[in-house]
Image (cartoon, rainbow, N blue to C red):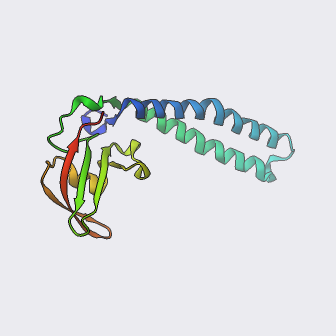
């Protein structure tokens, strides 16, 4: 796992959320599923017990998710959002764009895939739009290929997160 390509860059808030999710999975969800398995086992013959098999399947999925989160947390590097200047679009930058075709203004924050939330206008740097904006400067026009065609934006402003 050597090399920066394997790091997961998160804000301190994103890191806290990931740790809280892992804690919830281990302390709330895991005991609940273990209880479901125990109750289903108490119903008798487990070979034909649908509740038992469903609970065991939930347990496998839960343990896989716990394992994946634990592994990800070993690769997290937290970044203070104020470490970047606003001259170019980088991780955590807030970018105001103008859609050249419609004239509509859009605002996105570039974040790691783990913190992406389209409803909050937080897009992954690995998404087509995120990749198209990385490294660009205020005033530049960018053409980004997306599944629906091409987007052409002008970068109006780049802000450092507060």
- In depth, the one of 82 and 22 nearer the eye is 82
Query: Is residue 19 left or right of 45 when viewed as pictured?
Result: left
Picture residue at 54% right of the left edge, 36% below the top:
66
Q: Position of residue 124 (x, y in %)?
A: 33, 48
Q: Quadrant of residue 42?
A: top right
Which residue is at the front of the view, 112 or 106? 106
Residue for point 25% across, 51% down? 96
| Image quadrant in which the C terminus is located | top left
Vertical arrangement, residue 136 with respect to residue 154, above or below: above
**Residue 9 appears at what percent x and percent y?**
32, 35
147 sits left or right of 50 in the view: left
Give coordinates of residue 154: x percent, y percent. Answer: 18, 58
User: x and y percent of residue 133 in the render?
Assistant: 21, 52
Query: With 102 as the anchor, is 11 left or right in this view?
Result: right
Count of numbered labels shown in the rendering = 0
For the point 30% across and 51% down, which residue is it? 107
82 and 126: which one is in front? 82
Q: Splitting the image into 4 quarters, where does residue 113 fall? A: top left
* Image quadrant containing the N terminus: top left
| Residue at 31%, 54% in the rendered image | 127
């Amino acid at each position: 796992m050597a090399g920066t390509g394997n790091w997961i860059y998160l804000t301190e808030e994103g890191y806290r959320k990931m740790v809280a999710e892992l804690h919830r999975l281990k302390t709330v969800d895991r005991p609940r599923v273990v209880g479901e398995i125990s109750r289903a086992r108490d119903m008798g013959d487990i070979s034909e017990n649908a509740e038992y098999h469903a609970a065991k399947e939930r347990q496998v999925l839960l343990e896989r998710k716990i394992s994946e989160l634990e592994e990800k947390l070993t690769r997290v590097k937290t970044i203070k959002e104020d470490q970047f200047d606003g001259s170019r679009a980088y991780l955590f930058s807030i970018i105001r764009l103008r859609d050249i075709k419609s004239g509509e203004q859009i605002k996105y924050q570039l974040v790691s895939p783990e913190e992406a939330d389209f409803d909050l206008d937080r897009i992954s740097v690995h998404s087509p739009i995120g990749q198209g904006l990385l490294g660009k400067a205020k005033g530049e026009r960018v053409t980004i290929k997306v599944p629906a065609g091409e987007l052409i934006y002008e970068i109006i402003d780049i802000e450092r997160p507060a």
